[in-house]
Image (tube, grey):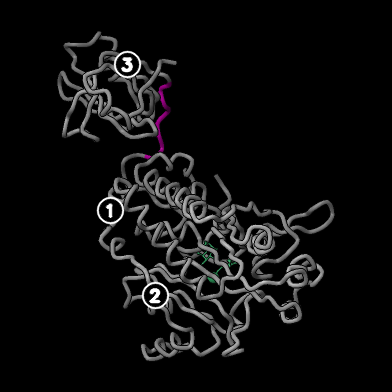
Amino acid sequence: MPRSTEIRQLNDHVGEEVTLTGWVEATRAHGKVAFAVVRDGTGIAQTVFFKKELDPEVWERHAALTQESTVAVTGEVREEPRAPGGYEIAVRDLQVIHTSAEYPIQPKEHGVDFLLDHRHLWLRSSQQRAGLKVRAEISQATHDFFYDRGFTRIDTPILTGAIGEHAGTLFETDYFGDTAYLAQTGQLYVEAACPAFRKVYCFGPTFRAEKSKTRRHLTEFWMVEPEVAFADSDDNMRLQEDFVTYLVERALERCSTELEILERDTSVLERIKTPFPRISYTDAVARLQEKGSDIEWGRDLGAPDEVSLTEDHDLPLFVYNYPKQAKAFYMKENPDDPRTVLCDDLLAPEGYGEIIGGSQREDDLDRLRERIAEEKLPEEAYDWYLDLRKYGSFPHSGFGLGIERTVAWITGRHHIREFIPFPRLMNRLNP
Ligand SMILES: NC(=O)C[C@H]([NH3+])C(=O)NS(=O)(=O)OC[C@H]1O[C@@H](n2cnc3c(N)ncnc32)[C@H](O)[C@@H]1O
Ligand SMILES: [Mg+2]
C-alpha cells in the first residue's frame, strides 16, 4: 500500500505531494475540471482534477468512479478556503482500489427502518460519524474524569446469577444447565469492590428486556456506574453534577465540529454549571398536580412528568427521595420518612428526562434481607451481596449514567439509537 497521509493532518503538508486513501463520497465534473470528495475516516477532502494536466486514463478513471469506491489519490495539497477543511488536493494520479457496487444510501431522504437495516453502511454518513465521535469523546472523558479523581476501574461481569434491577426485565440464558442473566447493572459488583478500593467505577454494556419503544430505551445500552464508600446521597448528587458538567465541557471543548454537523445550539450547553437544582419527589408531585397532572403520591414519574418538571429549567434537575415502592430493593430507607428511600434521578433539560439513577445503599444486613424478601427475590442469589453487610458494612452510594441518553441530550438529537454503533431495540437484533 502507498504511504498515505491522513486528511486530519493536511494542514501540515501544504505545498507537498501526498497520497490519500479512502472512500469516494461524491464526484462532479464541469467541462475540463472535475472533483471527487474523499473520506478517509479522519475527515473529508476535496480533490480536483484538471484535464489538461492529467494522463487521459486518470481522467477516465475519475469519470468511472462510483459512490463509496475506494481510491488512492496522489496530488499537491493547496489551500482552498471554499473546500472542506480549507484545503484541496490538485490530483496527479488516481488509483482505484475497488469500484463499489451501486451504494444503497443515496444523498436523499431514507426512512429510519431502511437506515437501521443498513446501519453497517449508515455509520459512514456525516451525521452518524459525528454522533459516534461525540460518544467516543464522552466515553474517553468518562475514563479521564474518574482516573483523575483516583477511582479504580472495575470490569464487572456480563453473565450473572443475581437480579440487579428489576426481575421483569431480565434476559435469561442457559448456563450449563443453570440460568444466567445478562447484567442489568454492574452496581452490586462495584459495591463489593469498595472495601478494596474505596471509590470505583464500571463502564460497559448492560441489558434490559424492556418492552419499551420510546426514544429513550435500548435493550442493550452502556452505563457508567461509580460507587463510593463513606459517601451519602448528598455526596452522590454532588459527584453526579460534577461529572455531567465535566462531560458537557469536554464536548464543547473537543467536539465543536461534530456539534456543528449535528446542528446543535451550543449556547444551551454553555449554560450548564453546578449546582443543579433539586426537588424532592413529594414536592415534585405537588408541582405536577398544580400543573394539572393526575399523578398521585407513590407512583413513579413517567416521561411526560419529567418533561413537565424540567420545562422551567435550563439546568439538569435532581428529583430525590422517591417512594420505596417505586424503587429497587437495595436503596436505603430515608430515616426522616420511611415511606421514601435516599435516591435521586437526574433529569436532563429540553425534554430528555432521566439520564442518571442513583442512591445510597442499604447497609444494614437485616433491613436489606427484609427488602429482598419483600421484593420476593431469591435470597440465595444474594448471599455474597449480603456478606458486604456482614463483614465491615459501610455507608456508600453510587449511580448509573446512561451514555446514549446523555449523548443524545448533549447533541440535541431525538433518538438514542443513533448513539450506539449497532442499536438493539425490542424489534431489532441485526445488523
Ligand atoms: N449504579 C446504579 O446505582 C445504577 C442502578 N443500578 C441502575 O441501573 N439505575 S437505572 O435503572 O435507573 O439506570 C441508570 C441509567 O441507565 C440508563 N438506562 C436505563 N435503562 C435504559 C434503557 N433501557 N435504555 C437506555 N438507557 C437506559 C438511564 O440513563 C438511567 O438513568
Ligand atoms: Mg432509573
Foreground mark, 1 or 3?
1
Dot 1: element: loop
Q: Quadrant of ligand 1?
A: bottom right
Mark 3 neighbour class, 10 Å CA radius: few under 14, some 14 to 19, many 20 or more: many
User: Is the C-beta separation of discs 3 and 2 under 8 Å?
Assistant: no
First of labels 1, 3 by sequence position? 3
- Give the main secondary structure of the magenta stretch: loop
Residue 402, placed above or below residue 420: below
Give the residue at x 38% y 76%. 277
Amino acid type at circle 3 is Leu
Marks 1/2: CA–CA distance: 22 Å
Q: Quarter of the image containing the C terminus?
A: top right
What segment is highlighted magenta in the picture? 98-105
Residue at which label 1 appears: 263
* Pointer 3 or 2: first along the chain: 3
**Neighbourhood count class around disc 1 (C-alpha, 10 Å): few under 14, some 14–19, many 20 upward:** few
Q: Quadrant of the N terminus?
A: top left
